[in-house]
Image: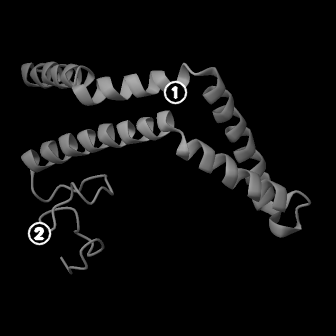
Amino acid sequence: MMMTDEWLAIIEQTDELAEMILTSDVLLAYRSAHHEVYSDPDLVEKIRNFSEMKDRYEEVQRFGRYHPDYNIVMKSIRLDKRALDMNEKVAALRLAENDVQYMLDEISAEIARSVSESVKLPTDNTFVTDSSCGGSCGTGGGCSCSA
């Protein structure tokens, strides 16, 4: 493929967009929340323990109730997850992650719409998809239309 002036212009604009995203308030808030979580040694240990428990959970799920540690692992995974979910720093990080995802979904949708209204969006974010059946429901799935 030959690199043309048009391609170079697109690449330069992509770099500008990436820089705008990287310096946005949304991404700065995400980085701050991420730092808050992963600079807390106790919280990092809880996250590591939860990851190990998830591995045990996967093993137990293969055998179901017949696994000897089924009840212990099932109870432990729920308690550990709840403890992490209730942590203020983890909750702030999840909200920040959602904000970043929403921003990226919005950008993707705007780019797709500028190309064509019928371009399908690779997102399940209902806030981004258009309810007027203008694009992402070509198979009749999301809005039950028969397009």
Type of residue at label 2? Ser
Residue depicted at 10% across the width and 57% down the height: 117
Q: Say if 110 sits above or below 35 in the image.
A: below
Asked whether 45 or 19 is in front, the reply is 45
**Mark 2 or mark 1, which has the lower sequence index?**
1
- For disc 1, the marked residue is 37
**Disc number lying in front (2 or 1):** 1
Residue shown at 60% from the left, 50% from the top: 82
Secondary structure type for disc 2: loop
Residue 103 can be seen in this image = yes
Q: Secondary structure at mark 1?
A: helix
| CA distance separating discs 2 and 1 | 40 Å
- Relative side of 75 to 141, left or right: right
User: Along the line of sight, which residue is nearer the eye, 103 or 44?
Assistant: 44
Residue 2 visible, this orientation: no
Q: Position of residue 30 (x, y in %)?
A: 36, 29
Residue at x 23% of width, y 24% of height: 18
Disc 2 vs disc 1: Cβ atoms closer than 8 Å? Answer: no
Q: Which percent across, then down, holds residue 22?
A: 27, 22
Mark 2 closeness class: few <14, some 14–19, many ≥20 residues within 10 Å: few
The residue at which mark 2 appears reads as 132
Q: Quadrant of residue 134?
A: bottom left
Where's residue 44, x and y in %? Answer: 62, 27
The N terminus lies in quadrant? top left
Left or right of 58? Residue 128 is left
Q: In the image, residue 62 lies at what x, y percent?
A: 78, 60
